[in-house]
Amino acid sequence: MSTYNILILGASYGSLLASKILLGAHSVKLVCLPTEADLINSEGFRVRIPIRGRSEPIELDSRKLPGRVSAARATDVDPREYDLIGLAMQEPQYGSPGVRELMNAVATSRVPCMSIMNMPPFAYMRRVPGIDSELLKPAYTAPEVWEEFEKGNEIVRRLEKEIDAARFDAPEGRIQLPVKLRFYDSIFVPLAKWAMLMAGNYRCITEDGMRTAREAVHSDLEASRSIYDFVLDVCVKIGASRDELVPFERYAAAAESLSRPASAARALNNGASNIERADKLVQLAAKQKGMRHPALDAIVALVDRRLEANRKMRPAAA
């Protein structure tokens, strides 16, 4: 069976996806910063995956997997050379110099794309029938870069099967690795993540710092349930089915093991002037349906304040 040539934008999130694709003997190129690209090209990358019931995580070394990996800067790739493009950067990065131009080239190349972003690409939201996507633009750092993108259904279906079938040679024998790629016909399934982001990820952000996702969810379980169920209601109002969404109890159980603050909280703590605004996206989608929740409004206001403070600090630090 022939192999694919796949381009993935973003090494941090992209390495996990790349490692699973490499198990199928495909070729992957990661787009990242020059220092990251040099390191990956000379030493590959390693991904540590926790396995339930196993004391130590499994380490995947890209140099020992069947496929081939390389890396490059955004200015050094031609998207027309690839069969599929994976979008694995955080949303604000797509508007940065070099990446913005690459995104324009991706759009005109007509190469199928898939996203593993926390924040659904603006092009994706344009396809959701129950929403006026134009009213969602304030949630995006650079909505104009998402003008024309296509999905890669058939390629994704094959990758899903390969990742399902892949087994890793561990000391105790050949084992199945967690973190799967799943293809769904429904456009609404990815919206299930919204409730998790609002109840957990964005509530890691505090007025003057951050907390773990476990603390965000379990320090006040009823408050977490309230915002979670509200977001599920928003998704249903847009057109999702309850069967396509994850119930709060299942998420709360999973959150017990979330021992780090979410990436949005870490970015704010590190002085970021832009982060993914899934919080604002959900607020704007809810507003279109005449819905609001005080906890969601408080999250959005808090993130606005933290970003504004970071932006004011930048000139002084320059």
Image (cartoon, grey):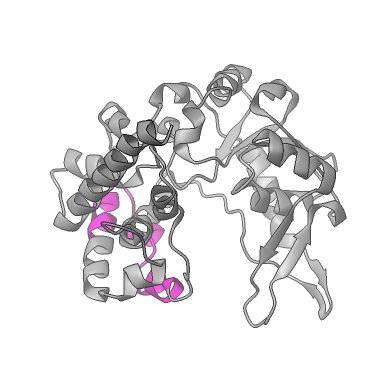
Quadrant of res 317: top left
Q: Dividing the image into 4 quarters, which one contains the C terminus?
A: top left
Count of marks, rendered view:
0
Q: Dividing the image into 4 quarters, which one contains the N terminus?
A: top right
The residue positioned 28% from the left and 62% from the top of the image is 228
Residue 196's x, y, as percent?
37, 60
163 up-or-down from 154: above or below: below
- Closer to us: 30 or 310: 310
Principal SS element in the magenta part? helix
Residue 120's x, y, as percent?
43, 41
Quadrant of res 52: bottom right
Instruction: Please check the rendered image and state whether residue 162 is part of the magenta-colored stretch, yes or no.
Output: no
The residue positioned 35% from the left and 42% from the top of the image is 277
Q: Is residue 294 left or right of residue 263?
A: left
Magenta residues, as a range? Answer: 230-255
- Closer to us: 223 or 133: 223
Q: Is residue 110 left or right of residue 161?
A: left
100 up-or-down from 140: above or below: above
Tell me if I can see residue 248 in this picture. Answer: no
Residue 7's x, y, as percent?
69, 34
Tell me if I can see residue 148 in this picture. Answer: yes
Q: Is residue 223 left or right of residue 165?
A: left
